[in-house]
Amino acid sequence: MDEAISKKEVTTLGGGCFWCLEAVYDDLIGVTSVVSGYAGGHVPNPTYEQVCAKTTGHAEVVQVTFDPSIITFREILEVFFTIHDPTTLNRQGNDVGPQYRSVIYYHDEAQKVTADAVIAEFNAAQIWPDAIVTEVEPLDIFYVAEDYHQAYFENNPYQPYCQFVVAPKVAKFRKKFRNKRKSKSG
């Protein structure tokens, strides 16, 4: 197989609770892996409880591995900006705190350039009534979240948070990006 075709790219995104982002990106064509975790803080190896206490500086994030020959980084960001509100600082719905901030942790300069361009384009188009507050920062360290956070929506679809918060975001993604889904059912 051609090495350029099989090359994978990684990005790290925060847009509220990582369960929401993980559930969507797991269903996106070209995505080969989604891992929930923490980034952007100052405490080594943080726990979920520490992050929720708002003292570590970390955001809840997902690290998305994808095949750029199937889906581009720009398309990854188009989904990202559809499934969360990038205009609210440190908040997504009832989830409030710096761990829920909107952030793109880029892995290389090309990702930074693309992220800045997409944000500028979306702000100019006034897609939202308020300006995008999404941070664009280089990834320093990514910490994998505890095992019970991985595939959370898939493993806990009837948990109330999943029913009332995650499921509507997944449904919105499935409706808008019907042609970008791995499975066409549901």
Image: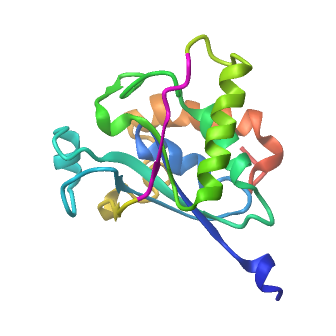
Check the image and report above or below for 157 versus 36. Answer: above
Q: How is the image coloured?
A: rainbow
Q: Is residue 175 left or right of residue 109?
A: right
- Quick one: quadrant of the N terminus? bottom right
User: Who is closer to the viewer here, 97 or 121?
Assistant: 121
Who's the residue at 76% across and 57% down the image? 71
Q: Residue furthest top?
A: 129
Q: Is residue 143 left or right of residue 180?
A: left
Who's the residue at 39% across and 35% down the image? 101
Who's the residue at 20% across and 56% down the image? 47
Q: Quadrant of residue 142?
A: bottom left
Q: Residue 166 appears at what percent x and percent y?
A: 49, 37
Q: Residue 128 appears at what percent x and percent y?
A: 63, 16
- Quick one: quadrant of the C terminus? top right
Check the image and report above or below for 156 versus 15. Answer: below
Q: Can I make out residue 155 in this image?
A: no
Check the image and report above or below for 63 versus 93. Answer: below
Who's the residue at 46% across and 41% down the image? 103
Q: Which residues are magenta?
A: 131-139
Label total for image: 0
Q: Can I make out residue 10 in this image?
A: yes
Q: Residue 17 appears at what percent x and percent y?
A: 40, 40
Q: Is residue 73 left or right of residue 158?
A: right
Q: Is residue 137 magenta?
A: yes
Q: Quadrant of residue 14?
A: top left
